[in-house]
Image: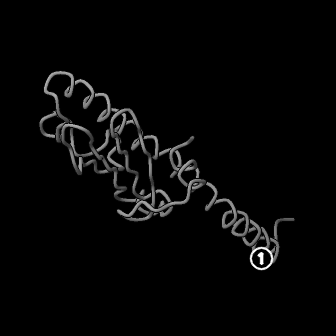
Amino acid sequence: SGFALIEELSVLRIASILSSIAYPSFQGGLNKARRADALVALVQVQISQERWIANHRRYADLAALRLPARSNGGHYTIQVLAADEARYEAIARATGTQARDTECRHMKLVIEGAVATRASGADDSVANPPAANRRCWGL
């Protein structure tokens, strides 16, 4: 009649083992979902840059484009690193809890002429191998 202390401890032990297995998988899925926040912000930069160059014959910084320096969800800071007549570079850097997404912490978009280059990495060097880039960018 009722549960003994040993039985309750066994149930707690099993629950803790299951949660320790499930949590990293859950966190990985959450990081992947939040990467969409960076992708949307970088696409907004790309669309705005194409409108801008059509009217001004050169690419611009975020201030001229009137775009915020944070993504809509607030998980990334956005910056245009370089912009001239022929190319621009934009980077999204993870902030807050998203910074734990080490493989895809920084995501960089480079547009030069008609060529788009997408890179990702743990730091500003965005030196992930091609397979990791495809995972980060969802390609």
Front residue of this view, candidates 11 and 129: 129
The picture places residue 120, in percent across and down from the top left corner, at: 45, 55
- Picture layout, residue 14 above or below residue 137: below
The way the protein has been coloured in the rendering is one colour
Based on the displayed image, in which of its 4 quarters is residue 15 positioned?
Answer: bottom right
Residue in the image at 35% along x and 59% along y: 96
Q: Residues within 10 Å of mark 1 (few under 14, many from 20)?
A: few
- Picture layout, residue 44 above or below residue 29: above
Q: Which residue is mark 1?
A: 5
Residue in the image at 75% along x and 75% along y: 9
- Picture layout, residue 66 above or below residue 103: above
Outermost residue toward the bottom in this view: 6
Front residue of this view, candidates 129 and 29: 129
Based on the displayed image, in which of its 4 quarters is residue 66 positioned?
Answer: top left
Front residue of this view, candidates 138 and 12: 138
Q: Amino acid at mark 1?
A: Leu
Outermost residue toward the right in this view: 1
User: On the picture, is 129 further left or further right than 44?
Assistant: right
Residue in the image at 13% along x and 27% along y: 56
The picture places residue 49, in percent across and down from the top left corner, at: 25, 32
User: On the picture, is 4 further left or further right than 33?
Assistant: right
Front residue of this view, candidates 93 and 27: 93
| Secondary element at image label 1 | helix
The quarter of the rendered structure image containing the N terminus is: bottom right
- Picture layout, residue 51 above or below residue 59: above
The picture places residue 84, in percent across and down from the top left corner, at: 18, 41
User: On the picture, is 62 further left or further right than 44?
Assistant: left
Based on the displayed image, in which of its 4 quarters is residue 43 positioned?
Answer: top left
The quarter of the rendered structure image containing the C terminus is: top right
Residue in the image at 25% along x and 29% along y: 48
User: On the picture, is 105 further left or further right than 136?
Assistant: left
